Amino acid sequence: MDPYIAEWLNLILRFLHLVTGVAWIGASFYFVWLDNHLETPPQWKADKGIKGDLWAIHGGGFYEVAKYQLAPEKMPTTLHWFKWEAYSTWLTGFALLIVMYYVGAESYLIDPRVADISQMQAIIIGLSVIFGSWLAYELMCMTRLANHSVLFALVLLLMGAGLAYGLSQVFSARGAFIHVGAVIGTIMAGNVFRGIMPAQRALVAAVESGEAPDPKYAQKAKLRSTFNTYTTLPVLFIMISNHYPITYNQPYNWAVLVAIIIITGAARQYFILRHFGKQKPMILIAAGLATIALAIVIAPKSADSSADKLAAVNASTAMSIVQQRCTTCHSATPTDDVFSSAPAGVMLDTQAQLKQWAPRIKARVIDSQDMPLLNKTNITDKERAQLAHWIKAGAIIDDSNKGESDKQKY
């Protein structure tokens, strides 16, 4: 695919995925909050079958919201359903996965250092994992295990850990992360399609026909809704994780992902309890401390020690390394087959630009070592150490380039 067209498709799909995701998660958060803040209604409302009500003010107006124990005496002519937010989020996310990770598999999904597989093999593995995991979850929901929520959650967590580990042995680090996210997102959307919506349709049909609703539909919907509630924050993290290689460019990246899923799930539990009026700050404090501990454990080993053993590295040497290993992408005129413009606007055509972006180079090339992307330009450890040496010494550039550096500050 032409890089320029691919970039526009990526932008449009990413934007749509973000917008629909905000709509879905926003609606989900609102209804969780609403359910947990309903108050006992006055008797005249209770006599009409109202279970709870709530008053709110927003945008210069007052709102009265009521939830029925079962249903109103007469069904409204217009009933709003919340489903396309979920479906649209999944559809745009799946389209983005295809454009970025399947069409661009050799750039984003396949890492020869991890597994030497073809583009078609990678696509087949990816799709099999996504839909196979969804099918496994659906089958689990049909077993007695689904009646024991805590045990059900622990089994799912163990399966998720195994999935993360397995994918890390086949795909690039970011490809593995995004596929775990795709699995969770597919299950979440499937929960709406296969569990929550059928339960709501059954409720409406029962009310309209004057029959008592079958409680099994509500029980199944509750299980699936609970899954969606606790996986919201983990899947949001995975959506943005490709911007933070400090999490995925690790020897044990799968364990890092599992830890973050647990931490974010715990944070969600705090807010759920808070909605019920139960203050459990230790949950949030523990999640914060766990995040700090994780950051310490996965902190990159400094390249300074090896850099100190090298002879002095001048700007010309640093520039030579960057021109050979980095400017195929990070240039005003990229020659890479994936990028039609410099990623993130980072251009390294001059020594002045090299100095300007020295902190970013240290973070990505030396610390996390996720750049060059999948090391497609074969930068060596010695070259990384040389760049570290130059940056540690102050990223000093030649006198002839200092004027250009001053211009870029203003």
Image (spheres, rainbow, N blue to C red):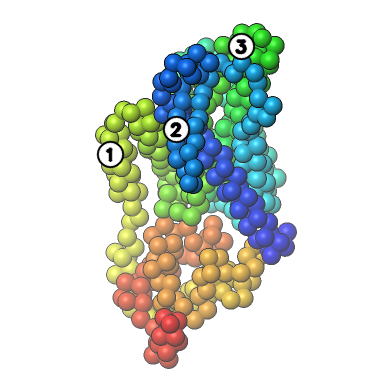
Residue at image point 45% right, 51% down: 249
Report, in whole angstroms, how far the alpha carbon at label 1 lies from the one at label 3: 42 Å
Report, in whole angstroms, how far the alpha carbon at label 3 lies from the one at label 2: 28 Å
Q: Identify residue for label 1.
A: 285
Asked whether residue 156 is in view, the answer is no
Q: Position of residue 142 (x, y in %)?
A: 58, 15
Using residue 133 as the reference point, say whether residue 37 is left or right of it: left
Residue at image point 44% right, 62% down: 364
Q: What residue type is labelled 2?
A: Trp
Residue 4: quadrant of the picture? bottom right
Q: Identify residue for label 2.
A: 55
Badge 1: few (under 14), some or many (20 or more) residues near its Cα, within 10 Å?
A: few
Badge 3: few (under 14), some or many (20 or more) residues near its Cα, within 10 Å?
A: some
Name the N-terminal-most of marks 3 and 2. 2
Q: Where is residue 293 in the image (x, y as percent from the top left)?
A: 29, 44
Residue 260: quadrant of the picture? top left
Report, in whole angstroms, how far the alpha carbon at label 2 lies from the one at label 1: 32 Å
Pick the residue in front: 48 or 399: 48
Using residue 388 as the reference point, say whether residue 153 is left or right of it: right
Residue at image point 57% right, 32% down: 188
Find the residue positioned furthest to the bottom. Answer: 400
Pick the residue in front: 240 or 220: 220
Using residue 107 as the reference point, say whether residue 54 is left or right of it: left
Q: Identify residue for label 3.
A: 213
